[in-house]
Amino acid sequence: MSSPQIRRADRIMPHDGALQALQRGFCCRVATVGEDGHPYCTPLLYVLMDDEICLHNTSAPGHFRTNVEREPRVCFEIDEPGEVFDYGRFECDSGLAYKSVIVFGRIRVVEQRDAKQRFCEALMAKYARPDTGRPKGFFPRIDAITVYAMTIERMTAKETILPPLAEQWPAKDKTRTPHARP
């Protein structure tokens, strides 16, 4: 797969950091392409399992499943927004502390019931509250969901770390606005 250059190479997150962000990320967005060429982006819960990104949706046919069956290439995104900070004299001289991971790959439907069971257990281990008192490992609606597994063909990750107050405006003026007048 041809990879465009990352414009802000100074923000590249190391591979281990990207995997950690994937492990703890909450909600992902998966972009597919419809038959008409229009992108379709769906927010979903997910787990990283067996070196793949696994997620689920209803088993009822819909836009997401139709797109995946027609074109398995997808784009996956998670982000961890942090604080907005000022670095210069003008309102537009602001930045955002964040981490983001984008993955390109191919997605497929997982048909095996035992793999769907493992996915559901991993999903509950990640998202469920441990003290609910509900039975564990029992998923009576497992046949009402579709589980998907996405290969990781290419992954990019970037981050901006919140600078200490001594590096933020007004303590330090890093105004970048061109032709600005005070």
Image (spheres, rainbow, N blue to C red):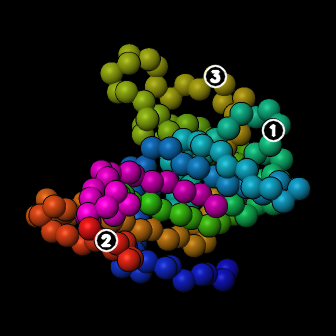
Q: Earlier in the sequence, mark 1 or mark 2?
A: 1
Asked which quadrant contains residue 87, the reply is bottom left
Q: Nearer the viewer, mark 1 or mark 2?
A: 2
Give the vertical position of 112 relative to 173 (above or below). above
Q: Residues within 10 Å of mark 2 (few under 14, many from 20)?
A: few
> Residue 86 magenta-drawn?
yes
Q: Which of these two is toward me, 71 or 82? A: 82
At 59% from the left edge and 57% from the top edge, which residue is drawn?
A: 76
The disc label shown at residue 140, or none: 3
Residue identifier under label 1: 62
Residue 132 in the image: state x and y as whole percent.
Answer: 38, 18
Give the vertical position of 1 relative to 122 (above or below). below
In this rendering, would 148 be left or right of 137?
Answer: right
Task: Read off the magenta span.
Answer: 75-94
Q: Nearer the viewer, mark 2 or mark 3?
A: 2
**Amino acid, disc 2:** Arg
Q: Earlier in the sequence, mark 1 or mark 3?
A: 1
Residue identifier under label 2: 181
Cα separation between marks 1 and 2? 54 Å
The disc label shown at residue 12, or none: none
